[in-house]
Amino acid sequence: MATEKAPTTVDEFYFWTDKKLIIKPFDVIKVNHIKNSVTFGVIEEISHLTDSASSLAGFISSDFGDTESEVNTERIGMNYVKARVVGNSQNIYTPVLDGYPVSLANEEDIKNALGLSDIKNPLPCGYITMYEEDPITVPVHFNSHFLIGPEGAHLNISGISGLASKTSYAMFLLKAIQDEYARNAKKHDDSVAFVILNVKGRDLLALDEPNKDLKNADKEIYKMLGLGASPFENVKYFYPYAKKADGVTYGKDFDAQRHLNKAFQFKYTYELDKDKIDMLFANVDDASGTMESIVANITSKTSEFASKTNWEDFKDKLNEYKQKGDTGKDKEISVLSWRKFSRHFNRVLEKSTIFHDNLNEKKGEVRLEEAIQKIRRNDVFVIDIAKLDEDMQGFVFGDVVSSIYDLKLGQAGERDEADIPSKVIIFIDELNKYASKDVPKNSPILRGLLEVTERGRSLGIILFSAGATEFKRCKTANT
């Protein structure tokens, strides 16, 4: 229907329905249009109208507010629906005409209306169910080229905190990608590997375990989407080093996983990792750049720190630089700056067990950088940082991102390019911790994130994130 006050337009139209018909917002409907075309709409609002001039009339007709009274004559009423135009079968976008019939859509109509037909490079991403009565379920696919390149990349999932749906959906999507690339490897010219950072709980520390509580109805949904209901394959877990694993992880199966060669403990040695110290200061406000200058001094090959081989010797030398009147060879950095650096560094070092110089590979001890250099297609690396404090979480995350960058730029070892996964997807929950407005602009971790989101696609480095607040600083595609 089209009235003087509510005409149909190229964007929206209105119609009435049987009062007892159950429909809901976001349901797809169709209306016949000129030249035997069909215009599709999505329901936005549903109202019920009567011939009553005001609410007072309803009060009076109920014997002035007697809730027990029965109305002698029912008022003339109808359900009044507003719909948003989403397409036309022949691309005719003149307003639909008054008096033309409106009906519910079938499965093919829904796919056409929502642009779900003939998706190129389809990747299952979920399903939608239309209508309360005689429901229709329609699988939904992304064009994978717009999710993991080359046409587009990166995904940010925003939502209400604490519902566990953001991380769960991210895992569903990652599993769909792994299934697609494992099942149809010959169809794809590229390959994918996954690096997942666990920042809370133990859910992500059991990705290779089957879900014993999966219901038959859920299995049917997986089948409809063309996915297997099996867990992730080729999973390896990396836990922070500690003599007792219970103190640094929420995981309960470390020993069993290590026995199956699926679990490792990561460390940072002074000799090989001192150039990463700058990431420990990612959240320290350093407007004058003195912390950056100190890090440059420490990592210089001509520095007095260059001869040190372990963290204890480094701390001893650092204490010398703190002494009044002695700043070593570098007189431009004040003693106060060295003391500030030392306080922050010692606080971090005392709270963490991952800074350790003895690396025992026979016991499953590794450096994350070296482990990432060996990642292969379809591998899933889960790096557990849930029990580390915020500074250390940022440090490990920054190291992971830079290590993947080095791998993709050919700066990590002598691996053949064909042997390196052409795409590496990084997933981290609560990404807003590392890229919020409160993070200093000179943060090396923030710089790494911006590098990934702005130029990572060309290298095949894809970022998936989830957070309770919208992640705006990095230019991710909100999907």
Image (spheres, rainbow, N blue to C red):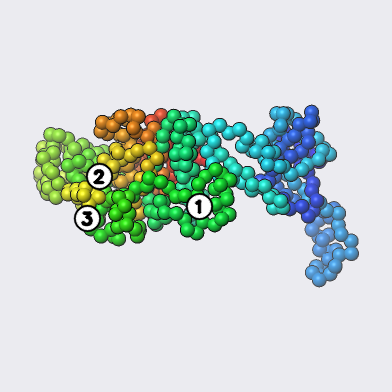
At label 1, the amino acid type is Ser
Marked residue nearer the N-terminal end (3 or 1): 1
Q: Nearer the viewer, mark 3 or mark 1?
A: 1
Distance CA(mark 2)–CA(mark 3):
20 Å
Who is closer to the viewer here, 269 or 358?
Answer: 358
Discs 1, 2 touching: Cβ within 8 Å:
no
- Seen in the picture, residue 405 relative to 16 is either above or below; the reply is above
Q: Which dot marks residue 165? A: 1
Q: Quadrant of the N terminus?
A: top right
Q: Which dot marks residue 414? A: none
Secondary structure at numbered mark 3: helix
How packed mark 3 is, by other alpha carbons closer than 10 Å (few <14, some 14-19, many 20 or more), is: few
Q: Which residue is mark 2?
A: 367
**Residue 306, image quadrant:** top left
Discs 2, 3 touching: Cβ within 8 Å:
no
Q: Nearer the viewer, mark 1 or mark 2?
A: 2
Distance CA(mark 1)–CA(mark 2):
32 Å
Secondary structure at numbered mark 1: helix
Residue for point 30% across, 46% down: 395
Image coords of residue 104 (percent x, y): 74, 44
At label 2, the amino acid type is Arg
Who is closer to the viewer here, 445 or 60?
Answer: 445
- Seen in the picture, residue 60 relative to 131 is either above or below; the reply is below
Marked residue nearer the N-terminal end (2 or 3): 3
At label 3, the amino acid type is Glu
Image coords of residue 45 (percent x, y): 70, 47
- Seen in the picture, residue 418 relative to 133 is either above or below; the reply is above
Residue for point 44% across, 44% down: 465
Taking the image as drawn, is residue 123 in sight? yes
